[in-house]
């Protein structure tokens, strides 16, 4: 199925107008989002207690008020936070469930740094401000409002739908691991914390990314050691020089180019919007992955180097212990963003080969991440997402996307569950403040977001 043009299959998935007022559901989503922002769901904060369990209880109350059986909702407190699940039983018990994934937690926000209190929702100039207003309470709130809307209309899914909301996606992902293990036999995951669209300065759509892969985030250390000594007696074993030489070799030794169906689809769409020179390089690489001129051109562009290859770069360095002594140790942190399909062990071995100095050690830094394969671009998922996006922008291309990593999807993909970032939010690049000061969401994205999720759920769950 083409990912670049609308299809008859996708168009057929567009459903009739709902009986319940769309405006009511939009208002409900905004209300849920406003109340959600007020819960300080920061895991491991030194400023204030984590309110994720209380937030989960609030979500349960909203779903119960919307017609869900309290027994179908479970809140599990663990690791200083909580995991939330709500199950809507489908009519065919033989079918595997669909998981709707989102996270309740947010990154830290210190009120003294913000123009507005980060945990007090503020509606101003067409935006709602507050920590989590975009990441990830926006789509979470729209999912909950949409599920309640469908429930009240009497719609019944054929496949069971499970809302699975984690409580520490931004930190240790302990609840994510729990949810991924609990639902490792699911049909697929639709992740609200991934994918999405971008608007230009005139509020016209530029692109919608269907996230089907993530790079693996992993850190390594390269360490040089020596006996040291007085600085007046320099030796050839100086760890700083040896480490510097190894880092120069790393800088001069990029990892090989590897393309798959996701990065190829992304590059094809990029070529349609790129400058003539960039488009020529992309098309040359798509025709021949060994085209060195195209590789060199795209590797020099930060927008493309991470798409076409694994990247490993030095990000931190430390060494020495006194200004008048030879260093006894020098160490560099190497941050790698690893393409799907490559293990952390493989990358360590390649780093060791590049360093080419047996007196240096290359070791892991445990960051809690793991390698996960790309998810296949299933026709049913692509058709459903196409229908959802075209409910708002009928002619917009759907672009397969790989993110730099990592979301909760990582743990599901690692267990063999296909996972797709299918968020509904469209916004301008200049409005993107996730994890930053004065995070905000355009209120105008909520109403079409409800339609997006309704169209998507009706298509994929049946």
Image (cartoon, rainbow, N blue to C red):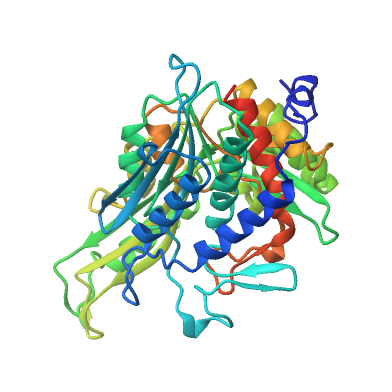
How many circles with numbers are drawn on the protein? Answer: 0
Toward the viewer: 173 or 290?
173
Image quarter of residue 284: top right
Question: Relative to 219, does residue 269 appear above or below in the rendering?
Answer: above
Question: Relative to 119, does residue 190 appear above or below in the rendering?
Answer: above
In percent of the image, x 27 and y 66: which residue is there? 330
Residue 427: image x %, image y %?
Answer: 71, 57
In the rendered view of the protein, which quadrant contains the N terminus? Answer: top right
Residue 308 visible to the viewer = no
Q: Is residue 374 left or right of residue 366?
A: right
Toward the viewer: 427 or 71?
71
Question: Relative to 42, does residue 437 appear above or below in the rendering?
Answer: below
Considering every residue shown, the one lying at the far top of the view is 94
In the rendered view of the protein, which quadrant contains the C terminus? Answer: top right
Residue 433: image x %, image y %?
Answer: 60, 66
Residue 214 visible to the viewer = yes
Q: Is residue 455 left or right of residue 41?
A: right
Residue 373: image x %, image y %?
Answer: 45, 31
Residue 30: image x %, image y %?
Answer: 63, 59
Toward the viewer: 298 or 8?
8
In percent of the image, x 49 and y 16: which residue is there? 92
Q: Is residue 221 left or right of residue 429?
A: left
Image quarter of residue 199: bottom right
In percent of the image, x 65 and y 26: which residue is there? 459
In percent of the image, x 16 and y 72: which residue is there? 228
Toward the viewer: 10 or 336?
10
């Amino acid at each position: 199925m083409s990912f670049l043009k609308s299809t008859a299959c996708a168009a057929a998935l567009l459903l009739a107008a709902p009986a319940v007022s769309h405006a009511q559901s939009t208002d409900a989503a905004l209300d849920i989002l406003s109340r959600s922002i007020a819960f300080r769901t920061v895991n491991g904060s030194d400023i204030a207690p984590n309110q994720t369990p209380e937030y989960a209880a609030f979500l349960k109350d909203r779903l119960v008020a919307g017609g869900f059986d309290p027994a179908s909702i479970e809140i599990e407190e663990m690791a200083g936070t909580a995991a939330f699940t709500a199950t809507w039983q489908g009519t065919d018990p033989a079918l595997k469930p669909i998981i709707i994934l989102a996270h309740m937690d947010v990154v830290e926000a210190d009120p003294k740094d913000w123009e507005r209190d980060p945990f007090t929702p503020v509606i101003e100039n067409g935006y709602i401000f507050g920590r989590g207003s975009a990441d990830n309470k926006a789509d979470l709130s729209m999912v909950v409002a949409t599920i309640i809307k469908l429930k009240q209309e009497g719609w019944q899914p054929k496949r069971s739908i499970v809302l699975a909301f984690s409580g520490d996606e931004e930190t240790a992902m302990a609840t994510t691991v729990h949810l991924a293990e609990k639902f490792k036999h699911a049909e697929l995951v639709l992740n609200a914390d991934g994918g999405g669209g971008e608007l230009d300065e005139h509020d016209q759509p530029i692109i919608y990314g269907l996230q089907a892969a993530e790079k693996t985030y992993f850190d390594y250390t390269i360490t040089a050691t020596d006996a040291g000594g007085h600085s007046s007696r320099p030796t050839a074993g100086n760890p700083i020089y040896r480490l510097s030489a190894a880092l120069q070799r790393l800088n001069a030794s990029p990892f090989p180019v590897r393309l798959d169906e996701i990065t190829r689809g992304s590059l094809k769409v990029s070529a349609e919007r790129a400058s003539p020179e960039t488009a020529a390089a992309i098309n040359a690489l798509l025709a021949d992955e060994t085209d060195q001129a195209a590789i060199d051109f795209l590797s020099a562009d930060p927008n493309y180097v991470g798409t076409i290859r694994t990247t490993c770069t030095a990000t931190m360095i430390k060494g020495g212990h006194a200004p008048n002594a030879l260093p006894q140790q020098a160490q560099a942190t190497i941050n790698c963003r690893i393409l799907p399909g490559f293990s952390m062990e493989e990358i360590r071995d390649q780093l060791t080969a590049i360093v080419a100095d047996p007196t240096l050690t290359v070791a892991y830094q445990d960051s809690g991440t793991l390698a996960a394969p790309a998810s296949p671009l299933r026709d049913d998922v692509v058709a459903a997402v196409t229908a959802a996006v075209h409910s708002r922008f009928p002619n917009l291309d759907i672009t397969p996307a790989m993110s730099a990593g990592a979301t909760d999807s990582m743990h599901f993909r690692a267990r063999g569950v296909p996972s797709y970032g299918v968020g509904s939010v469209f916004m301008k690049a200049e409005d993107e403040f996730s994890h930053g000061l004065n995070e905000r969401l355009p209120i105008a994205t909520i109403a079409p977001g409800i339609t997006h999720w309704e169209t998507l759920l009706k298509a994929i769950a049946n």
